[in-house]
């Protein structure tokens, strides 16, 4: 379901956040994905974090405008998600639940209009939480807000607001979150000097503690199959990764992180291998 209007509220600032955080890891992870002749996509993942190992098996099936996604992990948890687009024009409906946590069920409806988007989600239990979000504007500029309401306490668990500006080679966003206690502003710019890579900066402030965090990052395209990313914040935390496409849709990612203000501590390293034959 394509939209010519503003993005959902959850997309505000997402590009900058992904460049700063996505694919960084200090774990060891192996994933293999295959697709059957009937269109079922199967994926198996094994991960090791510290001294603990875990794994899961997932299956995804698409049929016309419907998608079914099921995942089972080594702790016998089962996640199931049903997604149907265009039950009504310009809508997407998502139903999800987890077994054995029967109170985790949720039903979400998204509506994408040319000048606005709306999402409503409700927990499928006796004391549901209602989540709302809305944005108005265009693909270039959008204003939005979101809130969560607990029916048991009759109080809002959160309310956030944000604005985003998007151009072909750059994007900027400002989000007021945590019930007005934190402010986060980010800017991302694509540079031809980085072979199509990008630089990003993010400033966040928590008013209750007067804590400020400045994070800068960059992505450099070494060649069509290899990218390098790095980020550093004013607290001295430095991270970097190298991601190489072995064959189409199969990636090897090596990442590391250390505290530049505590060099006596051992650096952390992560390795991820994702294969899709």
Image (cartoon, rainbow, N blue to C red):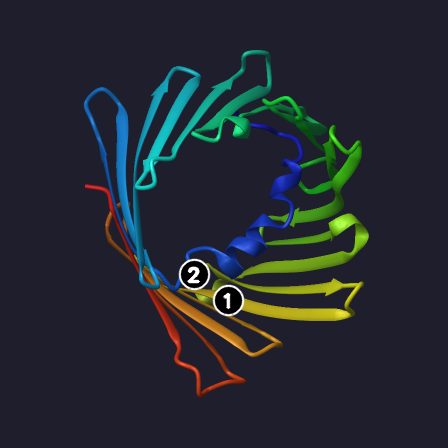
Label 1 with label 2: CB-CB less than 8 Å: no
Q: Is residue 193 above or below residue 28?
A: below
Q: Secondary structure at mark 2?
A: loop
Foreground residue among 43 and 242:
43
Residue assigned mark 2: 24
**Split into 4 quadrants, where in the image is the C terminus?**
top left
Residue at the far top in the pictured view: 88
User: Residue drawn 59% across and 28% down?
Assistant: 3
Residue 125 location in percent, x, y? 60, 23
Give the CA distance from mark 1 to mark 2.
Answer: 13 Å
Residue assigned mark 1: 218
Residue 71 location in percent, x, y? 35, 33
Q: Earlier in the sequence, mark 1 or mark 2?
A: 2
Local crowd size for mark 1, using a 10 Å CA cut-off: few (<14), some (14–19), many (≥20): many
Asked where in the image residue 245 lies, by quadrant, the reply is: bottom left
Asked where in the image residue 99 lies, by quadrant, the reply is: top left
Foreground residue among 204 and 7:
204
The answer to whether any part of residue 119 appears in the image is no
Residue 201 location in percent, x, y? 62, 65
């Amino acid at each position: 379901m394509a939209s010519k209007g503003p993005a959902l509220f959850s997309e505000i600032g997402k590009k900058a956040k992904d460049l700063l955080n996505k694919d960084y890891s200090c774990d060891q992870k192996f994933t293999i994905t295959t697709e059957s002749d009937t269109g079922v996509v199967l994926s198996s993942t094994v991960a090791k974090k510290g001294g603990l190992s875990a794994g899961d098996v997932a299956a995804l099936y698409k049929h016309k405008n419907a998608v079914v996604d099921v995942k089972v992990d080594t702790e016998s948890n089962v996640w199931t998600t049903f997604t149907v687009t265009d039950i009504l024009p310009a809508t997407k409906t998502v139903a999800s639940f987890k077994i054995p946590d029967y109170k985790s069920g949720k039903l979400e409806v998204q509506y994408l209009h040319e000048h606005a988007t709306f999402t409503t989600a409700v927990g499928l239990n006796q004391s549901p939480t209602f989540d709302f979000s809305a944005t108005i504007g265009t693909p270039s500029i959008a204003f939005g807000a979101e809130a969560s309401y607990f029916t048991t306490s009759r109080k809002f668990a959160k309310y956030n607001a944000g604005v985003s500006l998007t151009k072909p080679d750059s994007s900027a966003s400002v989000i007021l979150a945590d019930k007005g206690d934190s402010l986060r502003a980010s800017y991302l710019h694509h540079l031809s000097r980085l072979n199509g890579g990008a630089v990003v900066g993010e400033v966040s402030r928590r008013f209750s503690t007067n804590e400020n965090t400045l994070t800068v990052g960059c992505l450099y395209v070494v060649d069509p199959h290899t990218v390098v990313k790095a980020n550093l914040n004013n607290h001295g935390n430095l991270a970097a990764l190298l991601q190489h496409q072995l064959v189409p849709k199969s990636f090897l990612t090596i990442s590391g992180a250390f505290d530049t203000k505590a060099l006596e501590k051992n650096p952390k390293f992560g390795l991820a291998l994702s294969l899709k034959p």
